[in-house]
Amino acid sequence: MQERALETHNQPAERPLALSQRLAEIAAQPGSDRLSFTELAAELHARAWGGLLFIFAGINVLPLPPGTSAFFALPILIVSTQMVFGRSSPWFPARLNRRGVKKQELQRLISKIEWLELRVERIFKPRLAALTGPGATRLIGLVSFLLALVAAIPVPLFHVAPAAAILLFGLALIYRDGVLVIVAAIAAVLSIVVDALIIGSGVAALSYAASWLHRS
C-alpha cells in the first residue's frame, strides 16, 4: 500500500486542457446558443482573467465587419479595468452580460487557434512567477486597457496588432508564463508602431490625393 501511494505521489501532475479544448467543451454543452460573460467566466474557473482576455482579443484578431471590433474591445476594457483594481472575479454590466458571446463565435475562434495552440502549448509553462503575480497582473490589466482603447478605434485593420498583443498577455496569465509576458510586452510596443505606420501611411496617401486633386 505504501509503495502504491508513493508511486501515485511521484506521478507528474496531469497537464490542464489547452484553452481551445476547454472552449470546445463549453461550446458543445447543451442549452442556449449564447453564453453570458459571467457564465463564460465561471466555466473558465481559475483561468477566467487570462481566458477572457484571450477570447475577446482572439475574436478581435479575426476579420470583422466595421464597428464590430469596438464592441469586443469594450469587454476587454471592462475586464482589464477590474484587473487593475485587483478584483477577485469578473463583473459585467447587465446589458452587456446578457449579450454575451454566441457558441458559434467561440467555435469560430477555436477553429482559428486550435491548430496553433496544440503545437505550441507545451512550450508554455509556469516560470518567472513574479511576472504573473498579483502586482504584475494589475500592470498587465493596465497595458491591456490601453491597447484595447487603440483596438476600439474604427479604422480598418487597426485593431489586429493591439488585439494580438492582448491575446499573448491572456495566454501568459493562463499558463503563468513570465517569459510569455515579456514576449507580449514586446508585441505591445510593436503593435503601437504598426498602428502608427498605418496612420502615417493613411495621412501620406490623403495628402498625396489632395495635392493631386489640387493640381488637377
Image: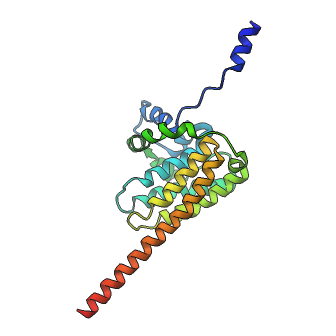
Q: Residue furthest left?
A: 216
x and y percentages locating residue 61 in the rendered image: 43, 54
Residue at 58%, 54% in the rendered image: 184
> Which part of the image, by quadrant, shows the C terminus?
bottom left
- Determine the residue positioned at 67% across, 20% down: 11
Furthest toward the bottom, the residue is 215
For the N terminus, the quadrant is: top right
Quadrant housing residue 43: top right
Asked if residue 182 lies left or right of residue 213, the reply is right
> In the image, is 180 to the left or to the right of 23?
right
The image quarter in which residue 44 lies: top right
Q: In the rendered view, would you say 77 is above or below 210?
A: above
Name the residue furthest top. 1
Q: Residue at x 31, y 89 (%)?
A: 211
Query: Residue 48 lies in what quarter of the image?
Result: top right
Most extreme residue toward the right is 2
Task: Check the image and report above or below for 70 versus 179.
Answer: below
Q: Left or right of 174: which side holds 55?
A: left
Seen in the picture, residue 202 relative to 36 is either above or below; the reply is: below
Q: In screen coordinates, is 133 left or right of 150?
A: right
Say which of 148 and 36 sits in front: 148
From the viewer's side, name the closer residue of 186 and 17. 186
Nearer to us in this view, 159 or 187: 187
Residue 175 percent across, percent down from the top left = 61, 41
Count of numbered marks: 0
Residue at the (45%, 49%) spot, across then down:
99
Q: What is the x, y in percent for residue 153?
A: 46, 67
What colour-coding does the image apply? rainbow
